[in-house]
Structure formats: structure tokens, C-alpha cells
Amino acid sequence: GQQVMQIPQYQHVQEGEDFTTYCNSSTTLSNIQWYKQRPGGHPVFLIQLVKSGEVKKQKRLTFQFGEAKKNSSLHITATQTTDVGTYFCAGRARGGNKLTFGTGTQLKVEL
Amino acid sequence: DSGVTQTPKHLITATGQRVTLRCSPRSGDLSVYWYQQSLDQGLQFLIQYYNGEERAKGNILERFSAQQFPDLHSELNLSSLELGDSALYFCASSGIRLAVGSDTQYFGPGTRLTVL
């Protein structure tokens, strides 16, 4: 079945440093979504990418969908303590009807 | 607030027991998804219902079952509970359009199940 892996599993950064998480799918995707889960909270939708090579920005967050539509990345510039949480990617295989969540990257930001 | 409600918020029970978790989707959403999240783990997809019909199945144990009712609320039934079933159970809902680009999932606050 489809597998979606994320690296790294954990990341500790100092406030102000940049952070990147990478998402890799075993199959070609029709779209990729990103979610953020704060500690003690529930996953919250951040963004969806659909086109090959697509890049979208949300303030300090930059999301990219690979040319082959099998990988994606989330980059945060100048992290803040409010960025703490676990970031999940989620992809739907081309022709599939199930959204598969990645393994998640837990981000901790230290002052 | 995502608009998805889940009850109860917490549930403590004993091994061998059966529990029912309830989810009400966002107004107008026809799809309901159930996920299991163990401590510091990812989201394990269990099952999806669309307008009352089972649409997709993940790693759901035979001891677990779900259904979606005509009013679109859903229930997840967990039976013969084991210690390892202790986890956070999330429900999510999504809109009626199943075309690419229209299946953003909105998660409820979750039910924390503790099996003693």
C-alpha cells in the first residue's frame, strides 16, 4: 500500500533558526496537504498543493510540491515559539480515494 | 473551532469492555473519517464513511466497527478492549466534492481513551 514518510522525525531549533521537513511518498500523488498539530491539540489544515512543482507561501512558511509529485517540503523561516508542534503531510494517490498521512515531524523551538 | 464535535472528551474503561465514540461532522460535510493516534505517534487511518456508506478502510481491527447514520453523525465502536487500544481517537470530516482539491479534512478535538 501507499506509504508516506517524513524526515526528520524530530527537530529542535533555536528561535530564529530555519526549519525544513521533507515528505516522500511511495506512489505518485494527485495532491498533497499539510497539517499542523499543536501539543495537546488536533491536526489543523494548513495548505494543499496540486500542481507539479507548485510553491505556495504563507507568511514565514513555504510549501513545495515536487516535479514528480512524489515529494513535498515545508520550510519555516526564522522559527518562533508559536511554530511548536507536529507537522504532517498527507497525500492522495493518483486515482485513489484515501488520504494517507505522513509519519510527522515534531518541531520544538527553544528560546 | 473546526465545527467537528466529538464526545466524550475522555473515556476511562477496563480491558475487555466495549465503548462507543461519537462524532458530528461539520454542517454539510458528507464524509467522516476516523483516526487513531497513540502517544507520540502518527495518525493511523481507520475508516471512512461517505453519506452513510463505507468508502475506505485502513488498519482497522476486527474488534472495531463504525457506522454513519442518516443525520451524518458517526460512531466508532471498540470492543474487547486491550491495553494497547489506549490512544487519542480523532474524527474528521470533509466536503461533498470528491474531485482533486476538495478533500480538506477538518478534525474534531478527539476522544482520549484510556484502557486500564
Image (cartoon, rainbow, N blue to C red):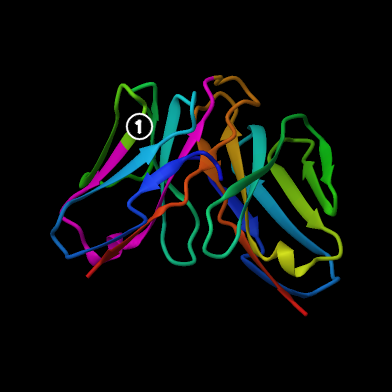
Left or right: where B47 falls relative to A3 = left
Q: Nearer the viewer, residue B52 or A5?
A: B52
Magenta stretch contains residue A94: no
Q: Which residues are magenta?
A: B75-96
Q: Residue at x 29, y 42 (%)?
A: B76
What crowding class fits label 1: few (fewer than 14 Cα within 10 Å), some (14-19), or many (20 or more)?
many
Residue lying furthest bottom in this view? Answer: A111
Residue B28 placed where, x, y %?
A: 49, 23
Left or right: where A81 falls relative to A102 = right
Left or right: where B28 falls relative to B84 = right
Residue at numbered disc 1: B73
Residue A29 placed where, x, y %?
A: 64, 33
Q: Secondary structure at mark 1?
A: loop
Left or right: where B83 falls relative to A25 = left
Residue B32 placed where, x, y %?
A: 42, 33
Q: Nearer the viewer, residue B55 or B88?
A: B88
Q: Residue at x 35, y 32 (%)?
A: B73
B81 to A47, vertically: above or below:
below
